[in-house]
Amino acid sequence: MQHRMLAAFVALTMLLVSSSGCLGLLQGREYMEHLRDDPVESESFAPLSIEHTFVNVQQETWDEDFPIDSAVTEISVYFKASFFLSDLTDDFALEPRYVDVLIKDSNGNEMWSKRTTTTESTLEEKIEPQENGKFISGDWNVFIEASGGGLAGIGEDSFLMTITVTRTCIEFPQADGECITL
C-alpha cells in the first residue's frame, strides 16, 4: 500500500512539475506586474516654430498645418516681431513692413490672429477650447504673410512665432519616459 502511495505521489509530482510551465509563467508575470509602479498621467508638448530674418527687402508667406486630436488640453501662442529702426522709418515713405498671422481650426474658423507693423513681443497667449472644453480635432492651419527688409550686419527685420500644443498622456515607468497619448 505504501509503495502504491509513493508511486502515486511521484507520478502526481512529475505531472505537476511538467505542467507548471504555463501556470508558472502566469504567476511570474503577476509577480512582475506587482513590482512595477503604476502609470502616471502626464503632459507632452509639441512646439511648432516659424522664425524668419529678412536679409533684403522681400515679402514671404508660410502656410503650415499642425494636428489637433482629442488628447489636446491646451494650445498656446508666442509671437515676437522686430523691425529695425521702426520708430524712425515710419515717417518715411518706405515699403510697408508687417507680419500677419492667422490660425484656423480644422473647420476654417479663425482661432487667433495678429497683425503688427512695429517691434512687439507678446506674452504667451492661450487659444480657448471650443466645444465642451475640447478643441476640434483635425489639421489646424497657421498662415503667415510678412514683409520686411534688412542689411546684413547693419540691421534686419525678423519675427518668431511658436505654437505649443499640450496633450494629456500616460507615462509607464518601464517605458523610459515615453508618454502615450490617450
Image (spheres, grey):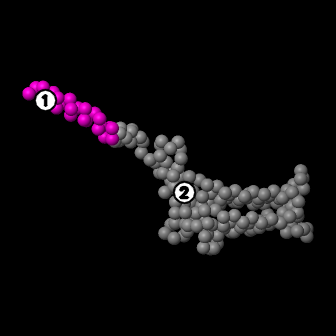
Res 54 visible = yes
Q: Is residue 24 above or below residue 85?
A: above
- Image location (x, y in percent) of residue 142: 68, 66
Q: Which residue shows up at 30% across the image and 37% down it?
A: 20
- Residue flagged by tag 1: what amino acid is it? Met
Give the labeled residue for mark 2: 167
- Image location (x, y in percent) of residue 69: 55, 63
Looking at the picture, tell me which residue is in the foreground, 22 or 42.
22
The magenta segment is 1-24
* Type of secondary structure dominating the magenta stretch: helix
Q: How many marks?
A: 2
Res. 5 mark: 1
Q: Which residue shows up at 58% across the image and 67% down it?
A: 138
With 176 as the anchor, is 64 left or right in this view?
Answer: right
Q: Which residue shows up at 80% across the image and 65% down it?
A: 60
Viewport quadrant of the N terminus: top left
Q: Which residue shows up at 42% across the image and 45% down it?
A: 38
